[in-house]
Image (tube, helix red, strand yellow):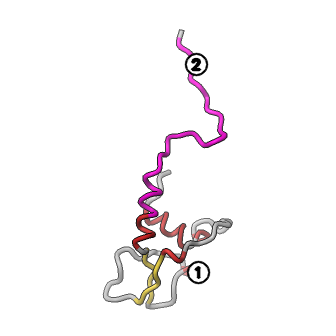
Amino acid sequence: EKLTPTQIHQHLYAPQSVNDWSVMPGFRHLYKVQKIQGNGSPFALQLPHKFAPKAGYEVVPTEDAKELVKYLLSLKKDAPIPGQVVAEAPAKK
């Protein structure tokens, strides 16, 4: 299942909001909590109530967070996991 940029941002900001068992630390320093102006930022994270900022505020990714997510999405995904045995196709006769 391919993750969306929004899902990755949420996981980076508050890993336990995605998986309550996660021991991964949050990378909140990559995000800015700001007062909502107008309709709010189109990039604001939609966080569960437990992880959301106080009323009238929103969490938005910094440029560093956006670049990190772009990099994570670019990583090659078809390589085997290190240490994993890869089954070879049977030889054709």
The part of the chain drawn in magenta is: 68-92
Does the magenta portion include 19?
no
**Could you tell me residue 61's position as x and y percent?**
43, 74
Give the residue pinned by disc 2: 90
Question: Is 82 above or below relative to 67?
Answer: above
The Cα–Cα distance between marks 1 and 2, rounded to whole angstroms, is 52 Å
Amino acid type, mark 1:
Lys
* Residue at image location 47% in from the left, 52% down from the top: 2
Residue 59 falls left or right of residue 19? left
**Could you tell me residue 16's position as x and y percent?**
62, 70
Question: Is 11 above or below relative to 49?
Answer: above
Residue 91 falls left or right of residue 64? right
Please name the predominant secondary structure of the magenta segment in the image. Answer: loop
**Could you tell me residue 40's position as x and y percent?**
35, 83
Helix, strand or loop for disc 1? helix
Q: Residue 44 occupies which quadrant of the picture?
A: bottom left
N-terminal of the pair, mark 1 or mark 2, is: 1
Give the residue pinned by disc 1: 50
Q: Residue furthest left?
A: 38
Residue 86 falls left or right of residue 47? right
Within 10 Å of disc 2 (Cα), the crowding (few <14, some 14-19, many 20+) is: few
Helix, strand or loop for disc 2? loop
Amino acid type, mark 2:
Pro
Q: Quadrant of the C terminus?
A: top right
- Front label number (1 vs 2): 2
* Residue at image location 41% in from the left, 90% down from the top: 35
Q: Residue 64 occupies which quadrant of the picture?
A: bottom left
* Residue at image location 64% in from the left, 66% down from the top: 24
Are the residues flagged by discs 1 and 2 in contact, CB closer than 8 Å? no
Does the magenta portion include 90?
yes
* Residue at image location 49% in from the left, 45% down from the top: 77
Q: Which mark is residue 15?
A: none
